[in-house]
Image (cartoon, rainbow, N blue to C red):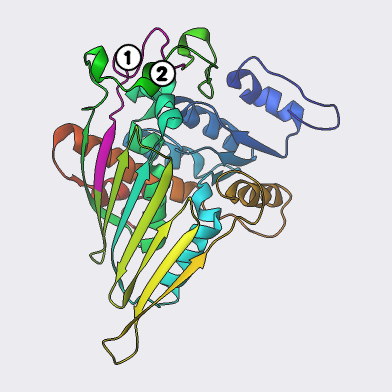
Amino acid sequence: MFGDGGAREFGSSDELLDQGALAALQLDGLVIGTPNDSHFRDICAAARAGLTVMAEKPVVTTVAQCQQLWSATNATPGRVLVGFVLRYVPFYSRIQRIIEGGEIGEVLAIDCQESLSTGLTGVFQKGWRSSLARSGGLIVEKCCHDIDVFNWLVGKPANRVFSMSNRQHFRPRPVEEQLGRFVRSRSTAAYDFGDTSEENVFAPGSVSNPYECDSQIPDRQVVTVEYTGGVLCTLTVLMAQPETNRKIKIFGTNGTIEGDLKEGRLSVVTAEPGRNVWTMREEIMEAPNASDHHGGDAIISEAFWRGVAGEEELSRAGLREGIEAVLVAAAAEESALTGLPVDVATLRRLTFGSSV
């Protein structure tokens, strides 16, 4: 806890979120950044206390928890914002404005690619993120950001999801087939966020490496989402790639938008009115500040603190958006497990009621 008295430490989130302790602390707001399997309990406790909450994504890890969370927080005095920081990044904000302005016509399809380099790949090989039960899976934990971008840009509810995943690269292999960057001698330890116990430290070449560890997370996954109105969205996520980056292409009836997040570059191609002539322009989206997530962290932080102070509304994602993303992401995890498409429309009705 931070305030006039400096920092105060608690032994656990349970100790902090005890209703008596919360009442005594007189907090204005709370940021929840605990591991995913704690989010349901922590969000509910903070909402009951009437706090303005910034909850790390995903808000929960399962469809059942989505339903329980919506029911449990509906009548509470608290307010929940969700850390979908990509909504605050100028790169994605610009894409949303171009789509909303109708420049590329009606959106037909969106294709996203997310690549994870060595360091970020390693985060998913040890610690709580490597557990399906604790993290919810790769799409729920890592890629609910991308699912939320689909939901935001399409602006309509998802109907069906189909997904395939595989752990084909990070499987037991002869030493000569293992990539050296994952098994080199131990150097500086990179701690897994939220779990710094010695046995959960990820370090290349430690007791286990991605070819030998018991991670339940796939090293690649593809998700296809069908939305009301027919828009089709596809996400491909791959580990062990040369760089960490996101790329996107939106296909419309009158043109396309193609973007590279790392470069901040957008290419917009549109047809001239009444003519079969196409024009292209490029835009460079520079981060407006030096914060992480391509400048998005500072913007989402300002939105949160303004919300805590009851000032101008700047939040771009609340609990409803957080749950919508988990419904699609959890459906993708189920589909990858069963090999069958999942009806998201039914899951939404069960969560939010028959009026949706």
Circle 2: residue type = Lys
Viewer-proximal residue, 191 or 43? Answer: 191
- The answer to whether residue 253 is left or right of residue 20 is left
Can residue 99 be seen in this snapshot?
Answer: yes
Judge the density around disc 1: few (<14), some (14-19), many (≥20) Cα neighbours within 10 Å. Answer: some
The question of residue 221 being in magenta is answered with: yes
Q: Is residue 5 above or below residue 307?
A: above
Question: Outermost residue, front direction?
Answer: 176
Marks 1/2 in contact by CB < 8 Å: the verdict is yes
Q: Residue 69: which numbered mark, if any?
A: none
Residue occupying image coordinates x 38% and y 53%: 247
Judge the density around disc 2: few (<14), some (14-19), many (≥20) Cα neighbours within 10 Å. Answer: many
Q: Which residue is mark 2?
A: 126
Please provide the residue range marked out in magenta: 203-223
Viewer-proximal residue, 231 or 12? Answer: 231
Q: Quadrant of the C terminus?
A: bottom left
Residue occupying image coordinates x 42% and y 34%: 60
* Residue 307 percent location from the top left of the image: 67, 51
Residue 172: quadrant of the picture = top left
Q: Which residue is mark 1?
A: 213
Q: Is residue 23 above or below residue 109?
A: above
- Count of numbered tags: 2
Residue 221: quadrant of the picture = top left
Can residue 324 be seen in this snapshot?
Answer: no
Q: Is residue 142 above or below residue 348?
A: above
* Magenta residues, dominant SS class: loop
Per the image, label 2 sits on a secondary structure element best described as loop
Circle 1: residue type = Cys
* Residue 235 percent location from the top left of the image: 30, 48
* Residue 37 percent location from the top left of the image: 44, 26
Q: Is residue 240 above or below residue 354?
A: above
